[in-house]
Image: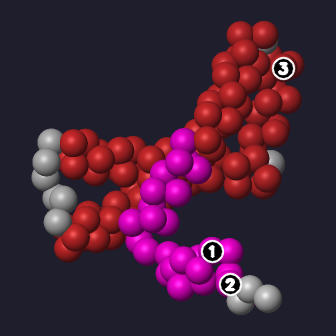
Amino acid sequence: MARQRPLSPHLQVYRPQLTSMMSITHRATGVALTTGTLVLAAWLVAVALGGETFAMMAMAVTHPLGQFVLFGYSVALIYHAMNGIRHLFWDLGFGLSIPEVYRSGHIVLFLTFLLTACLWLAILA
């Protein structure tokens, strides 16, 4: 009998890294922004249709679940924008060494949390 070997040994020893997780998150936030933009379009249609339709949409947005969705959308928007700027720097040839890649990754994460907090503090104030 042949010796039993694992099908994917690299998956058993692979540890997720900041760079791979940020890449996956960048793609996921792109998908989230696409679906969130559909909600934004629905809100604009509600504005155009008049007061009763807009009131229903406003009620949905002010509901705690609606606020959670808006918060998630804002996090996705800010993260995707910050990481996109990071990628633009890479396209220009800046920050490509491993230490710089990790430093810029940490900066993106820090700015995402900071800008999201500032946005929601301004909204709730």
The amino acid beneath tag 2 is Arg
Please tell me whether residue 23 belongs to the stretch shown in magenta.
Answer: yes
**Disc 2 element:** loop
Q: Nearer the viewer, residue 32 or 54?
A: 32
**Alpha carbons under labels 1 and 3: distance apart:** 53 Å
Q: Residues within 10 Å of mark 3 (few under 14, many from 20)?
A: some
Q: Main secondary structure of the magenta part?
A: helix
**Alpha carbons under labels 3 and 2: distance apart:** 61 Å
**Residue mark closest to the camera, 1 vs 3:** 1
- Say above or below: 47 vs 26: above
Q: Is residue 8 left or right of residue 77?
A: right
Q: Which residue is mark 2?
A: 5
Task: Provide residue 33's location: percent of width, then percent of height.
Answer: 58, 39
Q: Which residue is mark 1?
A: 8
Query: Image point 70% across, 55% down: which residue?
Result: 68
- Residue range of the region highlighted in magenta in the rendering: 4-30
Please tell me whether residue 79 belongs to the stretch shown in magenta.
Answer: no
Quadrant of the image for the N terminus? Answer: bottom right
- Say above or below: 6 vs 26: below
Where residue 25 is drawn, which disc sits there? none
